[in-house]
Image (cartoon, rainbow, N blue to C red):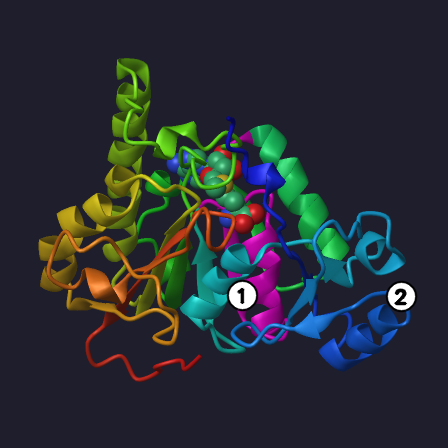
Amino acid sequence: TSYKISDLPKPRYARVNTLKMDVESALLEFKKQYEVSQDAMVPDLLIFPPRTDLHDHPLVKSGSVFLQGKASSMVAVALGPKPGWEVIDACAAPGNKTVHLAALMKGKGKIIACELNKERVKRLKDTVKLAGATNVKVKHDDFLNMSSEDPAYSKVQAILLDPSCSGSGTVVDRLDHLLPSYTADSSDVNRLEKLAAFQKKALEHALSFPTVERIVYSTCSINQVENEDVINSVLPLASSYGFELTTVFPQWPRRGHPVFDGSQHLLRTDLIEDKEGFFIALFVRKGASTPAKH
Ligand code: SAM
Protein backbone atom coordinates (compact mmCIF):
# COMPACT_ATOMS: atom_id res chain seq x y z
CA THR A 1 0.00 0.00 0.00
CA SER A 2 1.14 3.51 -0.62
CA TYR A 3 -0.15 6.47 1.32
CA LYS A 4 -0.39 9.66 -0.67
CA ILE A 5 -1.47 13.07 0.49
CA SER A 6 -2.61 13.89 -3.01
CA ASP A 7 -5.17 11.07 -2.75
CA LEU A 8 -6.92 12.79 0.15
CA PRO A 9 -9.77 15.04 -0.97
CA LYS A 10 -8.62 18.53 -0.11
CA PRO A 11 -10.79 21.62 -0.22
CA ARG A 12 -9.40 24.43 -2.36
CA TYR A 13 -8.96 27.86 -0.88
CA ALA A 14 -8.72 31.28 -2.48
CA ARG A 15 -8.08 34.54 -0.69
CA VAL A 16 -9.89 37.66 -1.86
CA ASN A 17 -7.45 40.51 -2.28
CA THR A 18 -9.51 43.17 -0.55
CA LEU A 19 -7.25 45.88 -2.00
CA LYS A 20 -9.00 45.15 -5.30
CA MET A 21 -12.33 43.53 -4.49
CA ASP A 22 -14.61 43.01 -1.50
CA VAL A 23 -15.48 39.52 -0.30
CA GLU A 24 -19.21 39.89 -1.04
CA SER A 25 -18.59 40.72 -4.70
CA ALA A 26 -16.14 37.84 -5.05
CA LEU A 27 -18.67 35.43 -3.51
CA LEU A 28 -21.41 36.63 -5.88
CA GLU A 29 -19.13 36.21 -8.88
CA PHE A 30 -17.92 32.72 -7.94
CA LYS A 31 -21.42 31.53 -6.99
CA LYS A 32 -22.39 31.80 -10.66
CA GLN A 33 -20.11 28.86 -11.36
CA TYR A 34 -19.03 27.15 -8.14
CA GLU A 35 -20.08 25.84 -4.79
CA VAL A 36 -18.33 28.35 -2.57
CA SER A 37 -18.39 29.42 1.07
CA GLN A 38 -16.54 31.81 3.34
CA ASP A 39 -14.03 30.59 5.94
CA ALA A 40 -15.07 31.13 9.57
CA MET A 41 -11.60 32.04 10.84
CA VAL A 42 -10.11 34.01 7.97
CA PRO A 43 -12.93 36.21 6.67
CA ASP A 44 -11.30 37.02 3.31
CA LEU A 45 -10.79 33.33 2.54
CA LEU A 46 -13.15 31.37 0.27
CA ILE A 47 -13.57 27.57 0.29
CA PHE A 48 -14.20 25.54 -2.84
CA PRO A 49 -14.77 21.81 -3.33
CA PRO A 50 -11.71 19.57 -3.86
CA ARG A 51 -10.20 19.68 -7.34
CA THR A 52 -11.73 23.07 -8.22
CA ASP A 53 -9.19 24.61 -10.58
CA LEU A 54 -9.17 28.39 -10.48
CA HIS A 55 -5.73 28.99 -11.99
CA ASP A 56 -7.11 30.53 -15.17
CA HIS A 57 -10.03 32.36 -13.58
CA PRO A 58 -10.10 36.05 -14.59
CA LEU A 59 -10.24 37.16 -10.92
CA VAL A 60 -7.05 35.18 -10.24
CA LYS A 61 -5.32 36.47 -13.37
CA SER A 62 -6.16 40.05 -12.42
CA GLY A 63 -4.89 39.74 -8.83
CA SER A 64 -8.31 40.23 -7.27
CA VAL A 65 -8.06 36.72 -5.83
CA PHE A 66 -4.97 34.78 -4.74
CA LEU A 67 -4.77 31.00 -4.60
CA GLN A 68 -3.52 30.62 -1.08
CA GLY A 69 -4.17 27.83 1.42
CA LYS A 70 -5.90 28.22 4.75
CA ALA A 71 -2.89 27.79 7.04
CA SER A 72 -0.83 30.20 4.95
CA SER A 73 -3.66 32.73 5.12
CA MET A 74 -3.83 32.47 8.91
CA VAL A 75 -0.30 33.85 9.33
CA ALA A 76 -0.88 37.51 8.42
CA VAL A 77 -4.18 37.49 10.33
CA ALA A 78 -2.31 36.18 13.40
CA LEU A 79 0.08 39.13 13.16
CA GLY A 80 -2.93 41.46 13.06
CA PRO A 81 -1.34 44.62 11.63
CA LYS A 82 -3.47 47.76 11.69
CA PRO A 83 -3.74 50.29 8.84
CA GLY A 84 -0.92 52.80 9.28
CA TRP A 85 1.52 50.43 11.00
CA GLU A 86 5.06 49.80 9.86
CA VAL A 87 5.75 46.11 9.37
CA ILE A 88 8.72 44.04 8.26
CA ASP A 89 8.10 40.89 6.26
CA ALA A 90 11.52 39.35 6.90
CA CYS A 91 11.57 36.48 4.38
CA ALA A 92 9.03 37.67 1.89
CA ALA A 93 9.16 36.01 -1.55
CA PRO A 94 7.03 35.03 -3.41
CA GLY A 95 5.00 37.51 -1.40
CA ASN A 96 1.66 35.85 -0.67
CA LYS A 97 1.79 36.88 2.96
CA THR A 98 3.23 40.31 2.10
CA VAL A 99 0.24 41.24 0.00
CA HIS A 100 -2.14 39.75 2.54
CA LEU A 101 -0.57 42.07 5.14
CA ALA A 102 -1.07 44.97 2.72
CA ALA A 103 -4.74 44.09 2.38
CA LEU A 104 -5.23 43.83 6.16
CA MET A 105 -3.57 47.26 6.44
CA LYS A 106 -5.93 48.61 3.74
CA GLY A 107 -2.89 49.75 1.76
CA LYS A 108 -1.97 52.22 4.53
CA GLY A 109 1.27 52.41 6.50
CA LYS A 110 4.37 50.64 5.27
CA ILE A 111 5.58 47.11 4.69
CA ILE A 112 9.28 46.49 4.23
CA ALA A 113 9.45 43.18 2.37
CA CYS A 114 12.91 41.69 2.63
CA GLU A 115 14.16 38.87 0.42
CA LEU A 116 17.67 37.46 0.06
CA ASN A 117 17.41 35.57 -3.21
CA LYS A 118 17.68 37.73 -6.33
CA GLU A 119 15.45 35.58 -8.55
CA ARG A 120 12.83 35.43 -5.84
CA VAL A 121 12.95 39.23 -5.44
CA LYS A 122 11.57 39.41 -8.99
CA ARG A 123 8.68 37.11 -8.08
CA LEU A 124 8.03 39.19 -4.98
CA LYS A 125 7.88 42.39 -7.05
CA ASP A 126 5.50 40.71 -9.52
CA THR A 127 3.20 39.62 -6.69
CA VAL A 128 3.20 43.10 -5.14
CA LYS A 129 2.40 44.65 -8.53
CA LEU A 130 -0.35 42.16 -9.32
CA ALA A 131 -1.95 42.78 -5.92
CA GLY A 132 -1.83 46.56 -6.31
CA ALA A 133 -0.13 46.80 -2.91
CA THR A 134 1.30 50.30 -3.04
CA ASN A 135 2.52 50.43 0.57
CA VAL A 136 5.15 47.69 0.07
CA LYS A 137 8.85 48.51 -0.22
CA VAL A 138 10.79 45.53 -1.56
CA LYS A 139 14.29 45.18 -0.16
CA HIS A 140 16.84 42.80 -1.66
CA ASP A 141 18.84 41.98 1.44
CA ASP A 142 19.65 39.48 4.15
CA PHE A 143 17.20 40.05 7.00
CA LEU A 144 20.07 39.37 9.41
CA ASN A 145 21.83 42.44 7.95
CA MET A 146 18.93 44.78 8.64
CA SER A 147 20.16 46.52 11.77
CA SER A 148 17.60 46.80 14.53
CA GLU A 149 19.34 50.07 15.50
CA ASP A 150 18.86 51.60 12.03
CA PRO A 151 16.63 54.72 12.33
CA ALA A 152 14.90 53.55 9.15
CA TYR A 153 13.24 50.82 11.25
CA SER A 154 12.63 52.88 14.37
CA LYS A 155 8.85 52.81 13.87
CA VAL A 156 8.44 49.14 13.04
CA GLN A 157 5.63 47.64 15.15
CA ALA A 158 5.39 44.12 13.81
CA ILE A 159 7.52 41.49 12.09
CA LEU A 160 6.34 38.52 10.10
CA LEU A 161 9.03 35.85 9.99
CA ASP A 162 8.31 33.00 7.60
CA PRO A 163 11.85 31.67 7.10
CA SER A 164 13.10 28.99 4.73
CA CYS A 165 12.09 25.62 6.11
CA SER A 166 12.12 21.96 5.09
CA GLY A 167 8.63 22.29 3.62
CA SER A 168 7.85 18.91 5.16
CA GLY A 169 4.25 19.99 5.76
CA THR A 170 3.53 20.66 2.11
CA VAL A 171 6.03 19.04 -0.23
CA VAL A 172 5.64 15.51 1.04
CA ASP A 173 3.47 13.31 -1.00
CA ARG A 174 4.04 9.84 0.34
CA LEU A 175 3.02 9.52 3.97
CA ASP A 176 5.38 6.65 4.77
CA HIS A 177 7.51 8.87 6.96
CA LEU A 178 4.63 9.02 9.42
CA LEU A 179 4.79 5.26 9.96
CA PRO A 180 6.51 4.04 13.13
CA SER A 181 8.96 2.02 11.01
CA TYR A 182 10.28 5.13 9.24
CA THR A 183 13.68 6.55 10.17
CA ALA A 184 15.14 9.74 8.75
CA ASP A 185 18.62 9.36 7.30
CA SER A 186 21.54 11.44 8.52
CA SER A 187 21.50 13.88 5.58
CA ASP A 188 17.89 14.76 6.47
CA VAL A 189 18.92 15.33 10.05
CA ASN A 190 21.84 17.51 9.00
CA ARG A 191 19.63 19.60 6.71
CA LEU A 192 17.04 20.10 9.43
CA GLU A 193 19.71 21.18 11.91
CA LYS A 194 21.04 23.79 9.48
CA LEU A 195 17.56 25.13 8.81
CA ALA A 196 16.76 25.25 12.52
CA ALA A 197 19.98 27.16 13.23
CA PHE A 198 18.99 29.82 10.69
CA GLN A 199 15.41 29.94 11.93
CA LYS A 200 16.59 30.51 15.48
CA LYS A 201 19.05 33.23 14.44
CA ALA A 202 16.38 35.02 12.41
CA LEU A 203 13.88 34.85 15.26
CA GLU A 204 16.45 36.18 17.74
CA HIS A 205 17.13 39.02 15.31
CA ALA A 206 13.42 39.83 15.01
CA LEU A 207 13.14 39.94 18.81
CA SER A 208 15.94 42.53 18.96
CA PHE A 209 14.00 45.34 17.19
CA PRO A 210 13.30 47.80 20.02
CA THR A 211 9.90 49.16 18.92
CA VAL A 212 8.37 45.90 17.73
CA GLU A 213 5.26 44.77 19.60
CA ARG A 214 4.20 41.68 17.66
CA ILE A 215 6.18 38.94 15.96
CA VAL A 216 4.74 35.97 14.11
CA TYR A 217 6.97 33.01 13.32
CA SER A 218 5.64 30.46 10.84
CA THR A 219 6.81 27.42 8.90
CA CYS A 220 5.28 24.89 6.53
CA SER A 221 7.19 22.17 8.35
CA ILE A 222 5.93 19.37 10.58
CA ASN A 223 9.31 18.89 12.30
CA GLN A 224 9.57 19.77 15.94
CA VAL A 225 13.19 20.95 15.49
CA GLU A 226 11.99 23.73 13.17
CA ASN A 227 8.96 24.57 15.28
CA GLU A 228 8.55 24.02 19.03
CA ASP A 229 12.30 23.60 19.55
CA VAL A 230 13.08 26.94 17.85
CA ILE A 231 10.48 28.73 19.96
CA ASN A 232 11.58 27.03 23.17
CA SER A 233 15.22 27.94 22.54
CA VAL A 234 14.50 31.69 22.28
CA LEU A 235 12.13 31.96 25.27
CA PRO A 236 14.71 33.34 27.75
CA LEU A 237 15.83 35.96 25.23
CA ALA A 238 12.24 36.83 24.30
CA SER A 239 11.36 37.27 27.94
CA SER A 240 14.42 39.49 28.53
CA TYR A 241 13.06 41.80 25.82
CA GLY A 242 9.59 41.73 27.42
CA PHE A 243 7.94 39.41 24.89
CA GLU A 244 5.42 36.75 25.83
CA LEU A 245 4.27 33.79 23.81
CA THR A 246 0.61 34.47 23.08
CA THR A 247 -2.17 32.18 21.90
CA VAL A 248 -2.74 32.18 18.15
CA PHE A 249 -6.39 31.58 17.13
CA PRO A 250 -7.59 30.27 20.52
CA GLN A 251 -10.55 28.53 18.84
CA TRP A 252 -8.24 26.27 16.78
CA PRO A 253 -7.96 22.78 18.32
CA ARG A 254 -4.50 21.67 17.21
CA ARG A 255 -1.75 23.21 19.33
CA GLY A 256 2.02 22.86 19.59
CA HIS A 257 3.51 19.57 20.68
CA PRO A 258 3.52 19.57 24.50
CA VAL A 259 7.29 19.69 24.87
CA PHE A 260 7.51 22.79 27.06
CA ASP A 261 5.33 24.86 29.33
CA GLY A 262 3.49 27.32 27.08
CA SER A 263 3.39 25.16 23.94
CA GLN A 264 -0.42 25.34 24.05
CA HIS A 265 -0.06 28.92 22.73
CA LEU A 266 1.40 27.54 19.51
CA LEU A 267 -0.70 26.51 16.55
CA ARG A 268 -0.21 23.49 14.34
CA THR A 269 -2.13 22.26 11.37
CA ASP A 270 -2.14 18.55 10.73
CA LEU A 271 -0.99 16.75 7.59
CA ILE A 272 -3.97 14.40 7.61
CA GLU A 273 -6.73 16.48 9.21
CA ASP A 274 -5.89 19.72 7.44
CA LYS A 275 -4.07 18.18 4.46
CA GLU A 276 -1.05 20.37 5.13
CA GLY A 277 1.31 20.80 8.04
CA PHE A 278 1.91 24.36 9.22
CA PHE A 279 3.14 25.95 12.40
CA ILE A 280 2.44 29.45 13.79
CA ALA A 281 3.78 31.17 16.90
CA LEU A 282 3.00 34.68 18.13
CA PHE A 283 5.07 36.83 20.46
CA VAL A 284 3.53 39.99 21.95
CA ARG A 285 5.51 42.50 23.99
CA LYS A 286 4.03 42.98 27.43
CA GLY A 287 2.24 46.27 27.80
CA ALA A 288 1.91 46.67 24.04
CA SER A 289 -1.08 48.93 23.55
CA THR A 290 -2.50 47.37 20.41
CA PRO A 291 -3.72 43.84 21.00
CA ALA A 292 -5.29 42.63 17.75
CA LYS A 293 -8.24 40.31 18.02
CA HIS A 294 -9.16 37.54 15.60
N1 SAM B 1 6.39 34.40 3.13
C1 SAM B 1 6.49 33.92 1.76
C2 SAM B 1 5.10 33.82 1.19
O1 SAM B 1 4.14 33.59 1.94
O2 SAM B 1 4.93 33.98 -0.04
C3 SAM B 1 7.25 32.61 1.69
C4 SAM B 1 8.63 32.71 2.29
S1 SAM B 1 9.68 31.32 2.01
C5 SAM B 1 9.11 30.17 3.17
C6 SAM B 1 11.21 31.86 2.71
C7 SAM B 1 11.94 32.92 1.89
O3 SAM B 1 12.98 33.45 2.69
C8 SAM B 1 12.61 32.40 0.64
O4 SAM B 1 12.19 33.16 -0.46
C9 SAM B 1 14.10 32.61 0.89
O5 SAM B 1 14.83 32.95 -0.28
C10 SAM B 1 14.08 33.76 1.86
N2 SAM B 1 15.26 33.89 2.74
C11 SAM B 1 16.05 32.91 3.22
N3 SAM B 1 17.00 33.42 4.01
C12 SAM B 1 16.79 34.75 4.07
C13 SAM B 1 17.46 35.83 4.74
N4 SAM B 1 18.52 35.62 5.51
N5 SAM B 1 16.97 37.09 4.57
C14 SAM B 1 15.89 37.30 3.79
N6 SAM B 1 15.23 36.33 3.13
C15 SAM B 1 15.69 35.06 3.26
Cβ(mark 1) to ligand 1 < 8 Å?
no
Reply yes or no: does residue 114 show up in magenta.
Answer: yes
Q: Is residue 181 visible?
A: yes
Q: Secondary structure at mark 2?
A: loop
Reply yes or no: does residue 116 show up in magenta.
Answer: yes
**Whole-percent x and y of residue 251?**
38, 76
Extent of the magenta region: 91-117
Give the amino acid at mark 2: Gln
**Residue at screen point 45% across, 36% down:** 167
**Residue at screen point 73% across, 77% down:** 23
Residue hosting label 2? 33
Residue hosting label 1? 110
State the quadrant of the C terminus.
bottom left
Q: Secondary structure at mark 1?
A: strand
**Whole-percent x and y of residue 175?**
45, 33
**Residue at screen point 53% across, 32% down:** 173
Nearer the camera: disc 2 or disc 1: 2
* Disc with the residue nearer the chain's start (2 vs 1): 2
Decide if residue 88 is on the left or right side of residue 205.
Answer: right
Decide if residue 201 is on the left or right side of residue 69.
Answer: left
Give the amino acid at mark 1: Lys
Q: Pointers 2 and 1 in contact (CB under 8 A)?
A: no
In this rendering, the answer to whether 23 lies above or below 172 is below
Decide if residue 97 is on the left or right side of residue 151.
Answer: right
Q: Measure how far apart labels 2 and 1 are at the Cα level.
A: 37 Å
Q: Is residue 151 visible?
A: no
